[in-house]
Image (tube, rainbow, N blue to C red):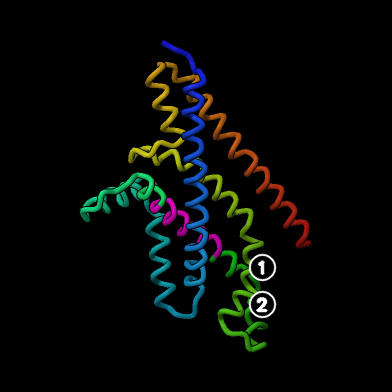
Amino acid sequence: MSSIGLPQIAFLLEGLKWTVLLTLISFVGGGIFGLLVALARTAEIKALRVITATYIAVFQGTPLLMQLFVVYYGIGLLGVNVDPWLAVSTAYTLHASAFLGEIWRGSIQALPKGQTEAASALGLHYVARMKDVLLPQALKIATPATIGFLVQLLKGTSLASIVGFVELARAGNVISNQIFEPLPVYGLVGLLYFFMCWPLSIFGTRLEMRLASGSR
């Protein structure tokens, strides 16, 4: 048996890099599509509301692990050679868009109806009403929950290893199988996750308290 040395630490940091990149791509991509989902969920067209409600229900009602399998093997059934990076980034982006869309939908609908009625009375159409009146207030309300989801998304990237994507958790598993010391390896992996997630959780909590005190 060998101990954890510089090569093992370098491999873990390489996995950490891919974990952070996957989280950022999924969060940004999911945020863009999630905003569209939220707008469709609150649109005046019933068909859009039904379609996006079904979309959200599918992703919230099924395990993320299954979603990874469906995207990875589903694309493969079409005869396309699937790269694990493309598969996991697509799956996580779709997953994030459903959850963020629902968070932001709830924030939009949590606003007093008087805001919408006042904007309509001023003659603002749907796009202007959302862009200039409702979304700035709704996104402020949704910020703490959005940060909380970001933490969950970061931890959830550990499931990407199931389709061969080498992120932090997978890198730890590889090293553990090489040196046969699972406790220190997974302990180090856990610390790396902790030092990424804990500051985000503290930031979200403080931001929520600041927003709550500012609204009084």
Above or below for 51 versus 172: below
Front residue of 186 and 179:
179
Between the residue at mark 1 and the residue at mark 2, the CA separation in whole angstroms equals 10 Å
Q: Amino acid at mark 1?
A: Gln
Which tag is nearer the camera, tag 1 or tag 2?
Answer: 1
Q: Magenta residues: mostly which secondary structure?
A: helix
- Name the spot of residue 47 as percent of width and height, x first: 39, 77
Identify the secondary structure beneath mark 2. helix
Magenta region: 90-104
Tag of residue 115: 2
* Residue drawn at point x = 54 percent, y = 35 percent: 193
Mark 1 secondary-structure assignment: helix
> Looking at the image, is 190 positioned above or below residue 38?
above
Q: Position of residue 64 (x, y in %)?
A: 39, 47
Of 53 and 179, which appears nearest the observer? 179
Q: Residue at the far top: name it.
A: 1
Label 1 with label 2: CB-CB less than 8 Å: yes
Q: Amino acid at mark 2?
A: Gln
Q: Which residue is mark 1?
A: 137
Residue nearest the observer in this picture, 130 or 211: 130
